[in-house]
Image (spheres, rainbow, N blue to C red):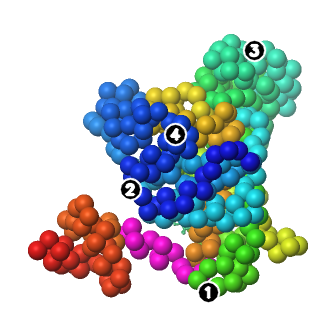
Amino acid sequence: MGTKNSRLQGFYQLNPFERLQMVKSFDGLGDEDLRVLHGGQGILSVERADKMIENVIGTFNLPLGIATNFTINGRDYLIPMVVEEPSIVAGASYAARMVREGGGFVAISTEPLMIGQVQVVGVAAPQSARHAILSHKQALIETANAQSRSLVALGGGARDVEVHFHATSPMGPMLVVHLIVDCRDAMGANAINSMCEAVAPLIEQITGGRVYLRILSNLSDRRLARARCVVPPSALARDGLSGEEVAEGIMWAYAFAAVDVYRATTHNKGILNGIDPVIVATGNDWRAIEAGAHAYAARSGQYTSLSVWERDEAGNLVGSLELPMAVGIVGGATKVHPAAQTALKLLGVESAGELAQIAVCAGLASNLAAMRALACEGIQQGHMGLHARQIAMAAGAAGGLVDEVARRMVEERNIKPARAEELVAELRG
Ligand code: MEV
């Protein structure tokens, strides 16, 4: 176990500035990092944003929270999460606390291999074209690697070539060449796309066919991250329910997602609730993660739960989660966005694989938190406090009045805009 302790008791009761000080002492962030995290001068400037996308007119802020209590592979992490939805950060932290009682998460990631696709049509003899492509494998790899020196400098590069054949499609047969690329610590999209474009003329020459699309696949099923956790039933007991009762409810929640596609979609959304905020906080491409996750959930031909939950012989709840995790810690927005840089610094990750492991653990934690809540008190109760604060703010409350109006509405079990307006007027008066 590392020396840092992510079990920050009472963290949620502090104000944002006090929390920041606690985060600082966890990981020795500097004053400049704090300013960035706290939305000071270091946050994404319009000038910088203007270099990132087109037609920029400004920037858009989202809350940045810290999920506490995570132990992954024996090391404690404070996990930055950027997300607009209440209860996600609290839920992940609560689940991580339960998992801590079972020894924490264990996570691994595979080699960072991605797939680039080159579509070839109009090939007269597809099987002999396939042979020809494979016999030119070395030349294709060299051509690809000559294109992306930065990836090669990182220790990555094209590693292999595969050929797939679709005998029919709405337009007729096609060959699809897969370039297998080791992306190391880069997400790799740009390098892969450039490589695919670079090898296309050679592929046309070899096959006599015509190349159309040259683009990476977001089904990065060779770049997986896996997480596993063991939760003793004693950690699950709450609000008059025994750990055994809660575990049984969670198993029924999982069983529902395993067999029912409508439920599996929502269940997986709950997993991505934990993953996407880490992806966003670190400047990574959350659409790529979403696309890969849902395709992976349907890899058997039947869309199903991404996570698997079981009971072991000791009665513990054992959760596991595996999904594609194409993330980088160099290049792109991870480099350009100051807050993403600080988030990576806070995590202290040394490789893209380590970031992938953290993200998948956050996903498993969110899944556990959602299933526990759904199987017990329901999901709404946890939302109440923050929901009430949002209603209070919309009704014009500011400063200390927000908490007071919210507290009164929760107490009265009447969280409505009209009531918030009455309370604002009354308390101001
Ligand atoms: C809400 O954002 C996520 C949940 O719907 C996930 C689930 O149902 O498992 C609570």
- Look at 64% across and 85% down and name the residue there: 241
Q: Position of residue 263 (x, y in %)?
A: 62, 71
Query: What mark, if any, has residue 404 been given in the picture?
Result: none
Q: At numbered mark 1, what does the secondary structure look like: helix, strand or loop?
A: loop
Residue under numbered circle 1: 240
Q: Give the alpha-carbon distance from disc 1 to disc 3, as whole Å.
A: 65 Å
Q: Which of marks 4 and 2 precedes in the sequence?
A: 2
Q: Is residue 322 magenta?
A: no
Q: Is residue 147 left or right of residue 22?
A: right
Q: Amino acid at mark 4?
A: Ala
Residue under numbered circle 4: 343
Q: Give the alpha-carbon distance from disc 2 to disc 4, as whole Å.
A: 19 Å
Q: Give the alpha-carbon distance from disc 4 to disc 1, as whole Å.
A: 38 Å
- Look at 26% across and 64% down and name the residue there: 400
Q: Is residue 285 visible?
A: no
Q: Is residue 101 visible?
A: yes
Dot 4, how many residues are within 10 Å of its Cα: few (below 14), some (14-19), or many (20+)?
Answer: many
Q: Give the alpha-carbon distance from disc 1 to disc 2, as whole Å.
A: 31 Å
Q: Position of residue 136 (x, y in %)?
A: 82, 18
